Structure formats: C-alpha cells, structure tokens
Amino acid sequence: MDILHRVGITASPKEVYDALTTIDGLAGWWTRDTTGDGEVGGVIRFRFEAAPPPSGFDMKVLAAEPAERVLWEVVEGPGEWVGTRIRFDLKQEDEYTIVLFAHEGWAAPNEFMHHCGTKWATFLMSLKKLVETGAGEPAPDDVRISNWH
C-alpha cells in the first residue's frame, strides 16, 4: 500500500531539490525541528511537538540525485512507518517542477495511513508555498486536521 501525490511548483527542479535535501529547506516546510545529514547514507531526524517524549521520524537517505530524485527509508518512528520508503521524483513540465511523491510500503491500509495521507498533502502544499514564496508552514505551524494534529 502506498500514499501517492502529485504537486506542481512554479520553480526550478534545483530549487525544489534544495528544499528536499538541505536541513534548512526541510525545516522550512515539514518541521522546524529537523537535524541530521541530508547526504546519501546520512540520517535526517524530524521531530514534532507532542506529549512527551516528542514524536518523530529518522530517515536514512538512500538516494539524492540533483534536481531529479530523493529517496529515504524510515529507520526510526511509529511501527507502521519503519521500513517504508519516501520518494520524491522531480520533472520539469512547462513552468512547473512536478513532484511525484510516494510513501511506499505500508503493510496494510489503516486509520493512521489515512491520517498520514492527508498530512502529507498539507506538508506538500507547505513545500510548494516555501519554494514559491519563501515561507512554508512547517510544524508546529502546520494545518491541524484532527485530534491527532
């Protein structure tokens, strides 16, 4: 089972790629509490405000092909996420960089997957806003969609 999205961003593939691979870029659209190493083989740590301890995900960078592709594997986080992969494929179409997003390898559809699909959509819109305007809506300033945040 996979979560899939397609978003067009009016910017170059390089600008979108930079927002997906630099710590400052990632902190500008997903969560302000982002640390780690965005190079292939590195681990990026994403943390979110929640009841103690803070929740989050650790992603091992499997691929980072400039202006084309970013691939992570979840190595720490909720059980449903561990072992899944997150992929961003980039391509130029007219004035847009098209982001083909996939969160791949869910064992089965469940309520948490439904929640994550919606949250990914809000964060991809934050990525779009960051690259197009210079200001995204990363956590903790993201859209709250339910009692799960």
Image: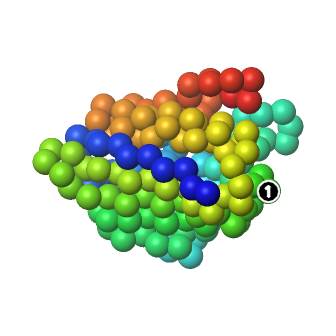
Above or below residue 143? Residue 36 is below
- In the image shown, does 48 or 82 lie closer to the viewer? 82
Above or below residue 143? Residue 19 is below
Crowd rating for badge 1 (residues with CA inside 10 Å; few <14, some 14–19, many 20+) = few
Residue 6 horizontal/vertical position (percent): 38, 46
The quadrant of the image that shows the C terminus is top right
The quadrant of the image that shows the N terminus is bottom right
- In the image shown, does 88 or 140 lie closer to the viewer? 88
Q: Kindly identify which residue carries mark 1.
A: 79
In this rendering, position of residue 146 left or right of residue 124: right
Residue 110 horizontal/vertical position (percent): 73, 45
Q: Residue at x 77, y 34 (%)?
A: 50
Q: Residue at x 26, y 58 (%)?
A: 91
Q: Residue furthest bottom?
A: 41
Q: Residue at x 37, y 60 (%)?
A: 89
Residue 32 horizontal/vertical position (percent): 57, 39
In this rendering, position of residue 99 left or right of residue 137: left
- In the image shown, does 129 or 102 lie closer to the viewer? 102
- Please indicate, yes or no, whether residue 129 appears anywhere in the rendered image: yes
Above or below residue 68? Residue 22 is above
- Please indicate, yes or no, whether residue 31 appears anywhere in the rendered image: no
Q: In terms of secondary structure, where does tag 1 sit?
A: loop
Identity of the amino acid at label 1? Gly
Q: Residue at x 55, y 50 (%)?
A: 3
- Asked which quadrant contains residue 92, the reply is bottom left
